[in-house]
Image (cartoon, grey):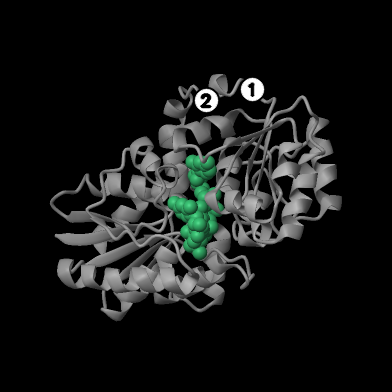
Amino acid sequence: MKRIVNVVGARPNFMKIAPIQRVMRKFPNEIEPLLLHTGQHYDERMSKFFFEDLQLPQPDIYLGVGSGSHAEQTAKIMVDFEKVCLEHKPDMVLVVGDVNSTVACSLVASKLWIPVVHVEAGLRSFDRRMPEELNRLVTDTLSDHLFVTEKSGMENLAREGVDPAKVHFVGNVMIDSLAYFLEKAAQSPILQQLELTQRNYVLVTLHRPSNVDDPENFLKIISAFERIPKDTPIVFPIHPRTEKNIKAFGLEERVRALSNLKLLSPVGYLDFMQLTQNCKFVMTDSGGIQEETTYLGIPCITLRENTERPSTVEVGTNEIVGTDLDKILPLIDRLFAGQWKKGAIPEKWDGHAAERIVEVLRRV
Ligand code: UD1
Ligand code: UDP
């Protein structure tokens, strides 16, 4: 019997762990999955809602670390997670993505000689000012089994000299969740609740420090929203970091002046998928939403200078524009003129990545 601790901490982790946890439970004589939540995200709307929507079991272990500086948060997780590992003696620790919980738990496990499994390995933005890039580099260096979502990840790990025997190209667990829950999401009443009609609104999310901790960039993005015709609602479920900064930078009035803006609290997974699959296009700086829009064939304007997910641009419906208005505004105009690339679904984004991962984990 293999005892595997599956780690979640922040919003983008829940939809990645859900399919893995579900497939692991199909092998009760071989795998004992323990779900551990660090508590990096803790608001109902950033955490609890996702357990309900994604049918995740309650965490077996909750660390409740909360917010803090990078060092504080990472250190708190490490101190608490070390105790968990010593008590529960897992055979493996499985981490997903690139958040602080990912790197903190990888470091603890590897120092205790517990094999580390990284799901979504190999992605690189080549921008070390992004905290996630540092988390990715460290986690991949420490990992014993690396599961990759797209071809660029295979190339990056090969270039960095990672032993190919440790690397598996399995596809994308985030898309597993999307494919699994798409029909259920279509029953969400959110469009009626917000009085939205199909393909007649723009969906926005923003939370990257490079955008929302920098008043100049934040203002540029708000002025891009002003280009969207007033009869087209802009639906903006707002991340807590972003909400705090609107207040801190005194941008409330500028935001309020956008008469077509619908500011919402963060919404649950099923509601968000329903909003995504029915919108005209998405403007975002999220990692995961670039992938979800590619899978759904929905145009995505990514308000970042780079992406660690190049297949969404090369194969999918994504365009990277940063905060340069000379790039953003013509794209908005093109979308309103009904022009966009068609896009395709990247290889192995077929809803079965978690099955491939668990198949490998049963063998190793
Ligand atoms: C984190 C991840 C980022 C990921 C994002 C997804 C890191 C370094 N960053 O960024 O990669 O894209 O989650 O959403 O791990 N806050 C609340 N309630 C919460 C959580 C956070 O109010 O439930 C507020 C706190 O003021 C906190 C701030 O948001 O200081 C930022 O939270 P944090 O987890 O540090 O980073 P995110 O910006 O959420
Ligand atoms: N998401 C959601 N509700 C929201 C915003 C995002 O359910 O209000 C989902 C989104 O569809 C995706 C995940 O959260 O599945 C991405 O998380 P986020 O953008 O916070 O993190 P990132 O992917 O940038 O690390």
Under mark 1, the amino acid is Gln
Answer above or below: position of 152 versus 239: below
Viewer-closest of 233 and 176: 233
Viewer-closest of 287 and 25: 287
Q: Position of residue 361 (x, y in %)?
A: 28, 60
Which image quarter: residue 227?
top right
Which residue is labeled 1 in the image?
Answer: 198
Q: Position of residue 281 (x, y in %)?
A: 68, 36
Q: Can residue 144 be seen by looking at this rendering?
A: no
Under circle 1, the secondary element is loop
Under circle 2, the secondary element is helix
Quadrant of the drawing holding the C terminus? bottom left
Answer above or below: position of 186 versus 39: above
Left or right of 83 on screen, residue 195: right
Q: Which mark lies nearer to you, 1 or 2?
A: 2
Residue behind label 2 places its C-beta within 8 angstroms of ligand 2: no
Q: CA distance from mark 1 to mark 2?
A: 12 Å
Under mark 2, the amino acid is Ile
Answer above or below: position of 355 versus 66: above
Q: Position of residue 225 (x, y in %)?
A: 76, 41
- Residue 99 is tagged as none
Residue drawn 22% across and 46% down?
25
Badge 1 density bin: few <14, some 14–19, many ≥20, Cα 10 Å: few
Residue drawn 26% across and 73% down?
82
Q: Earlier in the sequence, mark 1 or mark 2?
A: 2
Quadrant of the drawing holding the N terminus? bottom left
Badge 2 density bin: few <14, some 14–19, many ≥20, Cα 10 Å: some
Residue drawn 58% across and 52% down?
244
Which residue is labeled 2 in the image?
Answer: 190
Residue drawn 76% across and 52% down?
219
Viewer-closest of 31 and 76: 76
Left or right of 338 on screen, residue 107: left
